[in-house]
Image (cartoon, rainbow, N blue to C red):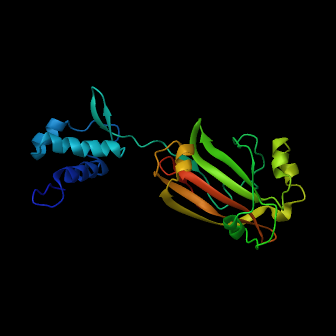
């Protein structure tokens, strides 16, 4: 890529893309120092403010890092956590054998809600609502994702109390096998994080996350659980096979 001084694209924007291209081509490698501002000025015949603006934007985007007294370096991509065999049941609460070590938040009872009623295919009739269960995806003390599961309070009327009292998962699910998930319809899409998700995941607002959302079905073919999971796209890899 060459800089075009007759282009309508500002020179700082062209330089920004040139630096990105050099990183992608391996000219500037991860963790390595890039040429100084003055070196880039001399090489490309640019003013210092033009070079400084391009670098400033790349720093804001997390592509470059400024180490005070040492120079500007290509950011090192963080090691990603692999979630093996990702499928519709990966973040299902009812599919777990235990909830003791997942960092489960206090269970909340949710009143009937039109959106949830539609996901559970519940007609417009009076019912006891839902249990909302939330827990983080953690590794080495770092949050990689946030899971939210909704379970029908009509099918599991004592779920909140059972968890609060420490009842084992095997006992909670006893005689409920027809209502436990065996398959699901889950969509994964990349979207900006909602404000609460950004706070929980400790990322800037509107950062792109992977959102896994959908319904899980029991052996009886009825929706038994709905999930809404937000995952840090910069820290995770999903293995699908």
Q: Position of residue 153 (x, y in %)?
A: 81, 58
Measuring 64% from the left and 60% from the top, which residue is drawn there? 87
Image quarter in which the N terminus is found: bottom left
Q: Nearer the viewer, residue 134 or 86?
A: 134
> Is 41 drawn above or below residue 97 in the view shown?
above
Q: Residue furthest bottom?
A: 123
| Residue at far top of view | 69
Q: 151 or 177, which is in the foreground? A: 151
Q: Residue at x 10, y 56 (%)?
A: 5
Q: Quadrant of the C terminus?
A: bottom right
Quadrant of the rendered image containing residue 99: top right
Pinpoint residue 212: horizontal percent, then vertical percent: 59, 59
Residue in front for this viewpoint, 170 or 22: 170
Q: Could you tell me residue 191's position as x and y percent?
A: 49, 59
In this rendering, is residue 241 above or below 142?
below
Q: Position of residue 28 (x, y in %)?
A: 27, 43
The quadrant holding residue 46 is top left
In the picture, measured across the screen, residue 123 lies left or right of residue 54, that is: right
Q: Is residue 35 left or right of residue 136?
A: left
Q: Taking 28 as reference, is 127 left or right?
A: right
């Amino acid at each position: 890529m060459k800089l075009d001084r007759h282009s309508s694209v500002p020179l700082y924007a062209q330089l920004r893309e040139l630096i990105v291209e050099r990183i992608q081509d391996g000219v500037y490698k991860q963790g390595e120092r890039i040429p100084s501002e003055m070196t880039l000025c001399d090489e490309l015949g640019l003013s210092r403010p033009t070079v400084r603006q391009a670098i400033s934007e790349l720093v804001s985007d997390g592509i470059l890092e400024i180490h005070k007294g040492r120079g500007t370096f290509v950011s090192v991509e963080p090691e990603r956590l692999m979630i093996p065999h990702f499928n519709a049941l990966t973040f299902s609460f009812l599919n777990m054998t235990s909830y003791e070590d997942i960092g489960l938040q206090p269970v909340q009872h949710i009143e009937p809600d039109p959106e949830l009623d539609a996901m559970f295919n519940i007609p417009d009739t009076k019912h006891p609502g839902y249990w909302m269960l939330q827990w983080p995806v953690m590794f080495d003390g770092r949050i990689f994702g946030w899971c939210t599961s909704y379970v029908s309070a009509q099918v599991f009327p004592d779920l909140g109390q059972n968890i609060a009292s420490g009842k084992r998962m095997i006992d909670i699910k006893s005689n409920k096998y027809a209502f436990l998930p065996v398959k699901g319809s889950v969509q994964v899409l990349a979207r900006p994080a909602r404000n609460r998700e950004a706070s929980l995941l400790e990322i800037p607002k509107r950062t792109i996350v992977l959102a896994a959302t959908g319904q899980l079905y029991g052996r009886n073919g009825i929706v038994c659980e709905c999930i809404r999971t937000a995952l840090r796209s910069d820290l995770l890899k999903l293995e699908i096979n």
